[in-house]
Amino acid sequence: MSAPAFINTAFLLRKIRDLRSLAPRRTRVKTKWATSLPRYPATNMALQYFDATCSLQLGQLWPSVRCSLLSERKYGALLNNFSDHQAVMSDLQDQGCWDFVSATQVEAERSELKRSHGGNRESSPLSLSANIKCFVFPRGDITRFKSARPDQYRLLGYYLLDAASILPCLALDVQEGHSVLDLCAAPGGKTLALLQTQAIRFLSVNDSSVARTSRVKNVLHSFVPKHLLSTDRLRVTSFDGTHWSAFERDTYDRVLVDVPCTTDRHSATEEDNNIFSKIRTGERKRLPQLQMDLLLAGIKAARPGGEVVYSTCSLSQLQNQYVVQQALHLARQEGIHLEVVSLQPLVHMLSGTFNFAPDLLLGEMVVPHLTANFGPIYMCRLRRLC
């Protein structure tokens, strides 16, 4: 009796290559990978870039941050004070959420009391608006929020966003009667957070994209009563923010410059509208220059004594600290002097809710962590001296 023939499975698989070859020829369909599936996915390109740059910037933190970027993000619910907010707030608290902004304000008052008793006046206190309320689930809890429902006036009760996104608004320190410019407002979450302060005398909302400005308008109409959207209180424009100084200069008490960036979490997880796609290579390379031009325009729009907050949702030093450094240098050449305002008091208060990158040269940055998967958000606060 002869021995059974040895079957080389690897050889057969190399020959067959595709099981579709076993199907009748008339039923075979050729995969059009060139048009439907990129040969080099943009998400892979983004991760390769982040591995090369962020590993140097963050060191031992990078593996944890990388894992968090690729995991489901955690959201916060920005309470809409213009709706039936008491009922909404009670419902959120019943679900186990807590308002980290109010808790931060209590901590700020305690810290200021300690400073006053100890005679320490080195850092100016940061006053947070009592009207901004953002609810999050406890650290490590990844429960999802339900979609907000409209009240009797058709206003939604809360706006879902990355909770770290409101930190630049808190850092802006808006006070009663201030005029505020939101230079790059879309999609509208930070604009809505600014309006929640109910302290702004006049708010100018701008974005260079007409389509994105329409999204901001939709957000405003879904959350803000019509009488508060009058032209004497609010202006919405679609203007190239880099040329804002040709339109207004030395005008605003506060300016928020939340610039377009590589949106690192989106770039690492989503193929759609990914800035690391090959057709957007030029746009990505031009980002630092665009960001610097926008920040410089925001600085010029602020009045002497006014303040500017620069923010991105990127981990990149090239888009964060280096942009701020270059803008400070160029502003100085034009006779505009600024000082960097420390955000360390805010970091200390919020360290129980967010994870912050240590030892940044300029500004502060929230980095994602599996137990608090918010961010990334970078922010730097500048005060115009003259």
Image (cartoon, helix red, strand yellow):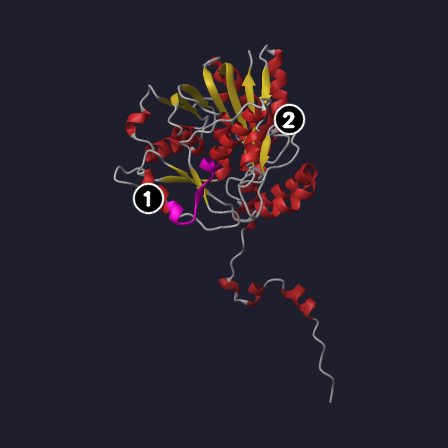
Position of 282 with respect to 91 (left or right) is: right
Q: Label 2, label 1: how many angstroms apart (C-alpha)?
A: 42 Å
**Quick one: 209 or 12, which is closer to the camera?**
209
Instruction: Look at 47% across and 24% down and name the residue there.
Output: 183
Q: Is residue 271 above or below residue 329?
A: below
- Element marked by disc 2: helix
Query: Which element carries disc 1, helix, strand or loop?
Result: loop
Q: Position of residue 216 (x, y in %)?
A: 40, 31
**Left or right: where does residue 333 sit relative to residue 311?**
right
Residue 354: image tag = none
Relative placement, left or right, of 205 versus 40 is left
- The range drawn in magenta is 92-103
| Relative height, residue 147 to residue 380 (above, below) | below
Identify the residue position indicated by label 1 in the image.
Answer: 149
Q: Is residue 122 magenta?
A: no
Q: Residue at x 54, y 35 (%)?
A: 349
Of all residues shown, which one is farthest toward the left? Answer: 152
Residue at point 55%, 37% (across, down)? 275
Q: Is residue 18 left or right of residue 194?
A: right
